[in-house]
Amino acid sequence: MQTLLRTPLHDRHVGLGARMVPFAGWEMPVQYEGVIPEHLAVRHDTGVFDVSHMGELEIEGPRATELLQGVLSNDLEKIGDGGAQYTLLTNERGGIVDDLIAYRLSPFHYLLIVNASNRDADFRWLKEREIPGSDVRDVSDRYALLAVQGPRSIERLGLPAARPFTFAEGEIDGVECMVNRTGYTGERGCELLVEADDAEELWDAVTARGAAPCGLGARDTLRLEACFALHGNDITPETDAISAGLGWVCALDKDFVGTEALRAVKEEGPQRRLTAFVMDERAVPRPGMRIEEGGEVTSGTHSPSLDVGIGMGYVASELAAPGGIVTIDVRGRPRRARIVEKPIYRSESS
Amino acid sequence: MAAAEDYPDSLLYHREHDWARVEDGEATLGITWYAQDALGELVHFEPPEVGASVRRDASYGEVESVKAVSDVFAPLSGEVVDVNRAVVDEPETVNEDPYGGGWLIRIRLSDPGEIEGLMDAAAYKAFVAEQ
């Protein structure tokens, strides 16, 4: 029996009557009021998620850029100081060790925000590839992270407008934090990185400004409507970035771990693709369900925005065109689904 | 809006958190307030066919929330004579009114003696308190 870790906001969640569940070794709120109202709060106004379970790795030193350019799929030369970038840690086969966001503080100093379940693996992966003049540190325990998302989130926080994938030092009602214009919901918003000791004060300020507390349940339905991949489900060390539809974050003109494998997949064309679908018949697809034409559902849920079952899964490339019909085996019952363009739901605010 | 916690005295209860309203050799079946609260807002009800037989303690359908799927267990045996299509179309009716508009199916009882094996409201409330 492993003890679950708690974020600095644990008492706040319990105080709000959240339903707490184990997730990636952490005790996390899955919902407060309910997944559907929380989801709709983010789509129509503002929600706040405690995502302090996510990992933060700092890479520092004169050769920090060189280290990262050799292990991350995207090209860090495309962003300047104050810029952020969605990118992948890839293995020799082009498989995905993790997906993450890199924040460039300076050419000699980066912050990587990584998935909770991969924090240790990512740290080891980078540590093993460290070069003289680059220092990798796990600083996760120092920080809490709040995602504030929704069409009114920036206005409610009193923040200036800023482009997506940028960041700056800022403060909310006197609490200093790093304000990152990033998120995982498909809405306008930001993620606030704050010293762990200040986390409760920041949470209180954000909720007092009208952000509805939202749990991991709504986080999952929101990200799936937006077709953001979930590592461990949609993307894994066994799935390559091209087949996953993440070729746009693979700078194949530079050399990083797995470049050759990815160039080969791109050259030949992937045999299967991560594809989004909407149920044509009443049913809720779930991860692991078989797609009768070949493949399986990697993410599936009920879409609160569209009030219909939605999902993603790998299907043969020739079947992956929007408009195509596939059949999902829903616990022995064949149910029809229609392949759609990504994202499944497009926000007006993002 | 979710209903307030309630276990009406007029109903009989099964340990899998199902209720039965028995009248004239038939029974209306549904899930209890406790069951719908544990699941959260329902988004899907997969009903049996009218004419199918259901067996006491066996699953006759599924209810799903965003996060979870749950079998629905029959508290009594019989043949399905009606399915609540309103719940198929609007599953959240179960959360709003679990003992009224949120009923799931109606059966003709094949063994009315099984009623003796069910809990009354007082016994079920004590059972829920131990969960």
Image: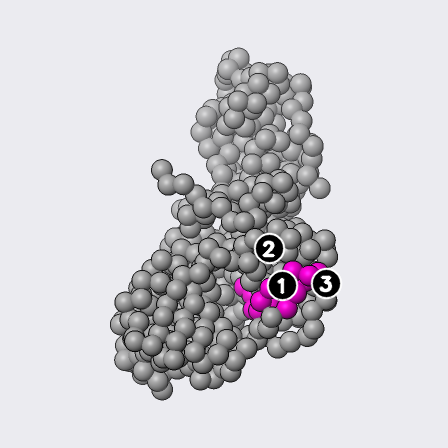
Badge 2, how many Cα within 10 Å: few under 14, some, many 20+? some
Where, quadrant-wise, is the C terminus of chain A in this rendering? bottom right
Q: Position of residue A98 (x, y in %)?
A: 38, 65
Amino acid type, callout 2 = Asp
Residue A263 located within the stretch drawn in magenta: no
Residue located 57% across and 18% down the image: B126
* Location of mark 3 (residue): A156
Placement of B115 over or under A83, stated as above or below: above
Q: Is residue A313 visible?
A: no
Q: Earlier in the sequence, mark 1 or mark 2?
A: 1
| Residues at discs 1 and 3 both on one chain | yes
User: Which is more N-terminal, label 3 or label 2?
Assistant: 3
Q: Which mark is residue A176?
A: 1
Residue at figure coordinates x 31%, y 62% from the top left? A124
Element on which disc 3 rests: helix
Tell us which disc is closer to us: 1 or 3: 1
Residue B5 location in percent, x, y? 66, 29
Residue at image location 45% in from the left, 75% down from the top: A109
Magenta region: which residues?
A170-185
Give the residue at x 49% y 30%. Answer: B73
Up the image or down, A189 lies above or below A301; here it is below
Q: Residues within 10 Å of mark 3 (few under 14, many from 20)?
A: some
Which numbered circle lies on residue A198? 2
Taking depth in this image into account, of A213 and B93 the one nearest to the observer is: A213
Q: Chain of mark 1?
A: A
**What is the distance, in whole Å, between disc 1 and disc 2 at their CAs?**
8 Å
Up the image or down, A45 lies above or below B122; here it is below
Among the 4 quarters of the image, the one containing residue A314: bottom left
